[in-house]
Image (cartoon, rainbow, N blue to C red):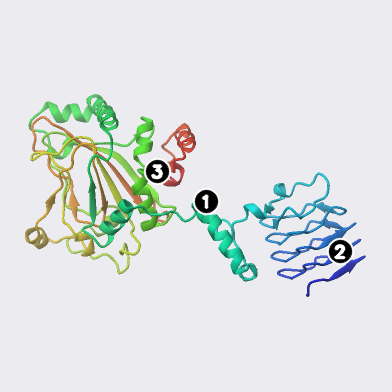
Amino acid sequence: MKKNKKFINKNLVKKNFWEFDLSNSEFHNTVIKKSVFTDANLSNSIFLNSKIVDTNLTHTNLKGVDFRTSKLINVNLRDSVYNDKTKWPKNFNPLKHGAIESKNFNPFSYKRKLSFKTIKSLSLKEISFYKNKAKKKEYFSKVSKIEKKIIYELTKGKGYIVIKNFYKKDIIDKVEKIIENKLKKNKSYKKATSRFEIDKMKKSINFFDLLNTDEIFTKMIQPKIAMSAFKALMGKNFICTYYSAQCSVAGSRGQSLHLDYPYVSYNNPGDKIPIGMGSNEFLLSCGILTYLNDSDKKNYGPILLKNSHKFRRFPTLEDVKKYKFTKIKVPKGGIVILNTLMWHAGAPNYSEQNNRSLLVAHYTPNFIKLRMDLKNNTKKNVFSRDKKNNGILDQLLT
């Protein structure tokens, strides 16, 4: 149907005007009922003494339309666009029916599902305008120099990056004290320190209820530079599937070599990761280790092999003999961000008195099955408080 059409004394019931160009048309004394105008162009049209009832006007161009002498009853205006020249009936609020004022319209927003024809109808000038508008609203976030470094190291680089002194001393001191208090009250810790002959595997103790413990843990699960890098590596809706404080009590044995979740199904010597899974173009898991104590010769962080994420398999016994593994030593308050496809293990704690505590967090794309149900185990007030602080906890635990 062509534009500049006239409808006079018509009764339009169950009519389909999907994607029709009806710009500059006139509707006089016309009843429109149970009809469809989805993705239609009604710009600069006039509705005189007409009635529109139970009609779908979603994604419709309503710029400059004059509805003043007509009635709109139970109409769906979701994502239809109007401007300051659009005239509405008295006491009719288009926003309540889902319409968008053109100054707030953003075709680059992921929430807007524009049809092919609608996109084709946008002029290059309009596209340029909306794109610049989207940039101003930070829909297209910029990646900083350190974020680029993180992305490079986790994909084409050695597989991890150490950032020293990431947290200020007062913050780390506070977290360290909280974990120390948890240890003192823990029955397993009392057993682990009371007898010399205790199983050394039992000298490793984890605490999981961190988010409900103190607000500081809500902030430390989402360090900004890591979140921006992970967004680029795993998609904007990535999630956190694991969060704990891991405490290696003095004399603990440490861990065996492993790959982290979701690669745990490939933890037998020589197991190969399926082709394409967790490739450099799209990672399936990243991790953050936050150091609550200083490292030294007897008590240091994880053992890992640089560049081992590129092997895309679990190490064999021969690999352990062949390669030289790195002992990561990080000062208190530093963090290690890593591609969890790397070969790594928690190191033994050879000290006689000093415990070692780390905050450990794993992140994956949002389609990976949850390892821990963090959301249902976190109190509602934690989410509301984080939202007020413009945090992304709700996304991370979804």
| Above or below, comparing residue 13 to residue 372 in the picture | below
Measure how far apart labels 3 and 2 are at the Cα level: 56 Å
Q: Secondary structure at mark 3?
A: loop
Corner quadrant of residue 352: top left
- Residue mark closest to the camera, 3 vs 2: 2
* Residue under the image location 80 percent in, 53 percent down: 87
Quadrant the N terminus occupies:
bottom right
For residue 137, which numbered disc appears in the image?
Answer: 1
Question: Mark 1 near mark 2, Cβ–Cβ under 8 Å?
Answer: no
Residue wearing tag 2: 27
Measure how far apart labels 1 and 3 are at the Cα level: 33 Å
Q: Residues within 10 Å of mark 3 (few under 14, many from 20)?
A: some
* Residue under the image location 19 percent in, 29 percent down: 189
Disc 1 residue type (three-letter): Lys
* Residue under the image location 53 percent in, 55 percent down: 134
365 left or right, relative to 135: left
Q: Secondary structure at mark 2?
A: strand
Q: Measuring from the top left, give residue 13's x and y in whole percent.
A: 84, 64
N-terminal of the pair, mark 3 or mark 2, is 2
Q: Is residue 110 visible?
A: no
N-terminal of the pair, mark 1 or mark 2, is 2
Residue wearing tag 3: 373
